[in-house]
Image (cartoon, helix red, strand yellow):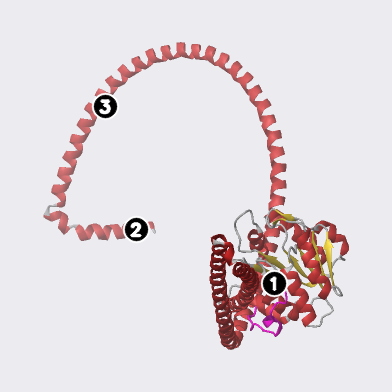
Amino acid sequence: MKTESFKPNAAMGLMPEDLPPSAWLGHLPFAFWIVEEQRPGTFVELGTHHGASYLGVCQAVRHCDLDTKCHAVDTWAGDEHSGLYGEEVLQQLRELHDRRYSSFSSLLRMTFDEALSCFDDGSIDLLHIDGLHTYEAVRHDFESWLPKLSDRAVVLFHDTMVRERGFGVWRLWSELQDRYPSFEFQHSHGLGVLLVGKQQVPSLQALASLHGAPQATVVQRLFEALGDRVVTGQHASNVERFGDIAREEAKRHLAEGERAYGLLAEARASGDALARARQAALVEISRLEVRVAELQKHLETANAAVAHHLASGEKAYQLLALAREDFDARASELQRFAEAANASAMHHLASGEQAYAELEQVRGEHEARVADLITQLGVAKTECERQRVDGEQALLLQEKLRCASEAEAASLRQKLSAAEASLESLRASADRERDGYDAQLADFDGRIRDVSDRLREVMASTSWRITGPLRQLGSLFKRARQG
């Protein structure tokens, strides 16, 4: 996927009008941003509690002048993660909600499953899941509401970074990241942004394309700085509210002290008891003045923190501008990489299809071979049965032959004894004849040696050498006559 530049907008810089207690406050700038970019037709929140996130989305809808219909679904009774609470939570939310947003928003007091029948399939563009945070509960919420999502739907998951007290959002988030384009913020307990619909606006596609890229850190830090500004604003508001309360309390105690002092002046003559009361009142006044000074100091510290986070936000925006330039510079290179990867994927796909076809062919041949082997196995079984019957018949015949051979062997042993006796007689006669042959052979060898000696003498003589040519000539005439 091509990595594109992140697109800021004006809504992300809004300050919330309402800051109820919530761990969601740090993500309100992103809620403002996504409402302006996506411009949802229907927004549904599962799990609202004090309403920090829901009121923030409603504020963005009104600020951007959208036709969005908003619906908060909750029992407003609490659960094992948010804790149990009373009717005062819903009453306080209604006071804020009905006064500002009742024209396009509704609070649905029911369970998440009961609310399913209130919405048509494919009708919800933006869904925020923030109910019971166990793995099983969050997975059930996502899967049961999935048919209600439109083809451009985005789902938000809060607390993706929490891995304690039985929280399981992180586990479901790790599974869904591999199935859909996504982006995750790690501050304020984590917020997962899941692009479920296939028809997304370019700015959301660009955000998801940063997933896993180094530039994602810049966007995360930008929204973290904007979120810190909101959280610090809440702290400052709380400090200011507590300071006002303390000042009113101090004024009340001061007025009481002054009244006590007046009474003490009027009743000075009453004695030492009234004098001690006056002294105690003065001590109480001094203590309250010290407390007011401490609260004033805390208020100054909070104001300084607000100023610091505002400066950090401006610096982060400058870093974002530099990052956008870097994104644009690398866009063409990343596009080339994407095209090369796509070509490689098509090549491997073609190779895979060819391999699958070859595998199908081998499988067919294998099935034919198996069928042939089964046939041969049947023939072999038949042949084995026939050979078993032949073997049994052969054993019977072998037994008959054994009996006959034993009788014949007895006869042969008798004949062998007679033959051995005859052979011994023949051997003695042969020995005698061999002795005679040896004597004749020795005499014949002696005669041959005599003839050889005489022949050598003749061939060594002078007459033999002289008559050599005559012998050759005679041989020629003899061959000529024969020819």
Q: Please give the residue where the numbered disc 1 appears in the rendered image.
A: 19
Q: Which segment is the magenta one?
A: 1-18
- From the image, which quarter does the N terminus lie in? bottom right
For the residues labelled 1 and 3, the Cα–Cα distance comes to 142 Å
Q: Please give the residue where the numbered disc 3 appears in the rendered image.
A: 437
In the rendered structure, are the residues bearing label 1 and label 3 in contact, judged by CB atoms less than 8 Å apart?
no
Amino acid type at image mark 1: Leu
Left or right for 50, reference 327: right
x then y, percent, for residue 284:
56, 66
User: Magenta region's main secondary structure?
Assistant: loop
SS class of the residue under badge 3? helix
For the residues labelled 1 and 2, the Cα–Cα distance comes to 145 Å
User: Which quadrant holds residue 226?
Assistant: bottom right
Please name which of the two marks, 2 or 3, marks the residue nearer to the observer. Answer: 3
Asked if 471 appears above or below 428 in the picture, the reply is below
Residue in view at x 22 percent, y 27 percent: 439
Residues 324 and 308: in front is 308
What is the residue that sits farthest to the front in this orientation?
Answer: 269
Q: Please give the residue where the numbered disc 2 appears in the rendered image.
A: 479
SS class of the residue under badge 2? helix
What is the residue that sits farthest to the left in this orientation?
Answer: 462
Mark 3: give few (<14), some (14-19) or many (20+) Cα within 10 Å: few
Amino acid type at image mark 3: Tyr
